[in-house]
Each structure stands twice: as C-alpha cells, then as structure tokens.
Image (tube, rainbow, N blue to C red):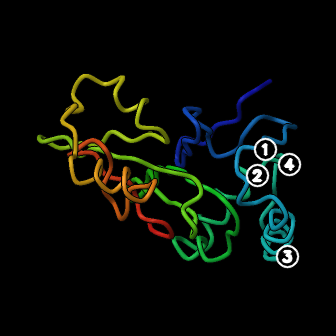
Amino acid sequence: MELLQDSTFWVLISTVIFAIVAWKKGREPLLEILDARSERIRKELEEIGVHFKTKSDTEVLLEAYKKWGLECLDRFNGMFAFALWDGPRRRLILARDRLGKKPLFYYKLPRGGLIFASELKALLEDPRVPRKMNMRALSQYLSFGYVTGEETMLGEVKKLAPGHY
C-alpha cells in the first residue's frame, strides 16, 4: 500500500495516523461514523468540486473538515472518536460521537501538552500519566456500573464528553 500525504491535515484513530488521504485505492473502515452517511457526504462534497483520490472514509472526514470546519461534525452520525491535527491553524481537534459509544481519554501535561487515547490502559503506557485512583469515580462505578461525566478511575485523566470536541 502506498501512503499519500499532504502533511497539512492528519487524523489519528486507533493508534494509526492517517494523512490527508488514507491508503491509495483503499477503503479503510476506520470510522463507523461515515458508515451509511459516507457516500452521502462524499457526493455532497463532489457536487461542490471536491475530487477524491481514494474510497477511504478518512479522506471524506478530512475533506469535510477542510470544507466546513468544525461544522462538519454536525454531518457525522454513528459511533466515532478521532483526533485531527489542523496544521494551518496549529490546532488539535479531539471529537467524540453524540452518544459517547467510542471513548476518548486525555491527560493534560503540567508543562503543556496532551496525551490521549481510546483506552485508559493505553494512557498508562506513558509514565507521565499519574496512577492515582479517583475514589469518587470508583464509588460511582461500584454503584451504577459506570462513571459519570468527564471523570475516570484515574484522578487526573478525563474523558471527552459525548458529542464534544
């Protein structure tokens, strides 16, 4: 597979970094967000002059962002969590589906920076992430079977709220 690159926009999903376009001639099923709506969004973009190089949902996501900015999130349906680096604006965007089916955890480093992952255990691979237990979150989990809001079992690690970026 040949990776096509633009280096302006990048997407990170499930520990894989995708450039402006995914794999040449590929169709990466990496986002369930664009499952049924991918073709509709693709057609809408093609009607306004966007030319696609692949059949990849990643390319649809990136082209939608380039065209509509953060408003593109309103067009996405289903389960998703992704990170997108907007090079020209020097902005990292983390986004999560409206129902919160796909998790996205993050830890703000004390001296700047951000560590994020779709699983807590992935964050624990970085020694800079504190391992202090959040007793309130533990109590919620034992009482309700889940942790509410942005809290997690790790005191300083948060989860992006459903439907937020």
Give residue 106's position: percent from left, percent from top: 34, 46
Dot 3: element: helix
Q: Nearer the viewer, mark 1 or mark 2?
A: 1
Q: Which mark is residue 55?
A: 4
User: Which residue is painted at 42% across and 59% down in the image?
Assistant: 144
Q: Nearer the viewer, mark 3 or mark 2?
A: 2
Q: Disc 3 marks which amino acid?
A: Glu
* Image quadrant where residue 143 sits: bottom left
Task: Write down the residue under mark 3.
Answer: 47
Residue shown at 42%/30% (left/top)? 121
Please state which amino acid type lies under the numbered disc 1: Pro
Q: Residue furthest left?
A: 111
Query: Does 161 appear above or below 127?
Result: below
Kind of element beneath mark 1: loop
Q: Are marks 4 and 2 in contact (CB under 8 Å)?
A: no
Mark-to-mark CA distance, 4 and 3:
16 Å
At x 71% / y 44%, what residue is drawn? Answer: 30
Dot 1 or dot 3, earlier in sequence: 1
